[in-house]
Amino acid sequence: MKSDKTTPNVPTLRFQEFTNPWTLMPLKKLLCFQNGINADSAKYGKGVKFISVSDILNNQYITYDCIKGMIDIDKKTKERFLVEYGDILFQRSSETFEDIGRANVYLDKEHPATFGGFVIRGKKISEYNPMFFRYLLCTPNARKQTVRMGAGAQHYNIGQDGLGKISLYFPTIQEQQKIAGFLSAIDDRISVQNKIIEDLKILKKELCNDHFKSVLHDASLRYITLKEILTERKEYCSKDGTYTHGTLSKEGVAPKTERYDRDFLVKNEDKQYKVTHLNDICYNPANLKFGVICRNTYGDLIFSPIYVTFEISDNVYPAYIELFLTNPNFIGRIRRYEQGTVYERMAVSPEDFLSYETHIPAYEEQVEFANEMQRIQRKIELETAFLSSLQNQRRFFLNAMFI
């Protein structure tokens, strides 16, 4: 590849065998636009496959096999709303302003499909490489124009006229093919990387489920209540600078950022916050249903007094008890203690939490199993960091290889 920051109408970075300037073209010269099918609800669930917004957003590209929805329509309607190889599909309506007009491409040569009412089809009427076009529509310039065309639309919509007025730069077909092949290789590697991470997460989950199921049914172990290994910490402090002010979420215990710190609304300067220390088990009584329970791996801080924090006794390994208490099977069982008349406020009290009976293996077994899970978790984190680097590369090339 070579870098060119001076020649007009060429990208910053391109393959060195290409030198011709790119051509600016409105999308209406390449695509004929049409809105999708709006049918009675009884028509859905059988018949031919139709492309929906989720198919546009959740696939690298669209093929017949990956389409989820089906619709029962006659032959004439099917022909009118036909989607064929190389057609571009746009999201017509969006819940967020930034997602107006997200696009994907149909790449199935054997099986044509149809498309739904929240989708606009761009029927191919001129020559282009379909995957190049798909990447081009993801570039910052294309997204900026698309969002601007939908700026005056109600309910974050974009229309056929707006899409047709978007003008983008296109190289020769040969250069389109080279760029599409290069970026597709990166996307394929990203897909592989996502699969590696997903498999590791599944492995960890299955090993945890199998282990805790085995422990639960191990008749050689005596039953204990959680209050034998956990003690509720009832330590309080005002926000006087002694401790960092933090929060509790599904991701763990962490300092509060300025963006989410609303303590300026609290007029009582003597308000007492709950103190938590390293390795404490913390949970939100009303949000156990959402998995808001964790081990404090950050350290000393204060957070809302609505949260519950437990000190762990010396005869259990902190990382092991964290795995046990954050396991979905445990959360499902402990939620039987929830009390309250409104779903959003149903909560598990610390007293009921501590009364839960279970088996706990010997300390040495706890350490061995927790360390094994930590090795898998470190592998997940390393693979996730590599995935992030691949995604950063993709963003760089989408910026540098297009105008």
Image (cartoon, rainbow, N blue to C red):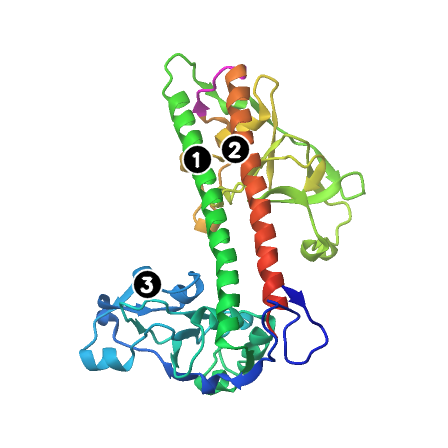
- The quarter holding residue 79 reads bottom left
Look at the picture and state if 169 lies above or below 324.
Answer: below
Look at the picture and state if 391 lies above or below 28.
Answer: above
Q: Are marks 1 and 2 in contact (CB under 8 Å)?
A: yes
What's the magenta region? Answer: 357-363
The residues bearing labels 1 and 3 have C-alpha atoms spaced at a distance of 28 Å
Secondary structure under tag 1 reads: helix
Residue furthest to the right: 241
Q: Are marks 1 and 3 in contact (CB under 8 Å)?
A: no
Mark 1 vs mark 3: which is more N-terminal?
Answer: 3
Give the number of the disc on residue 376: 2
Residue furthest to the top: 220
- Residue highlighted by disc 3: 67
Secondary structure under tag 2 reads: helix
In percent of width and height, residue 401 lies at: 60, 68
Quadrant assignment for the C terminus? bottom right
Q: Residues within 10 Å of mark 1 (few under 14, many from 20)?
A: some
Residue drawn at (70%, 34%) of the image: 299
Let me know if residue 228 appears in the view: no
Amino acid type assigned to the residue bearing label 3 in the image: Ile
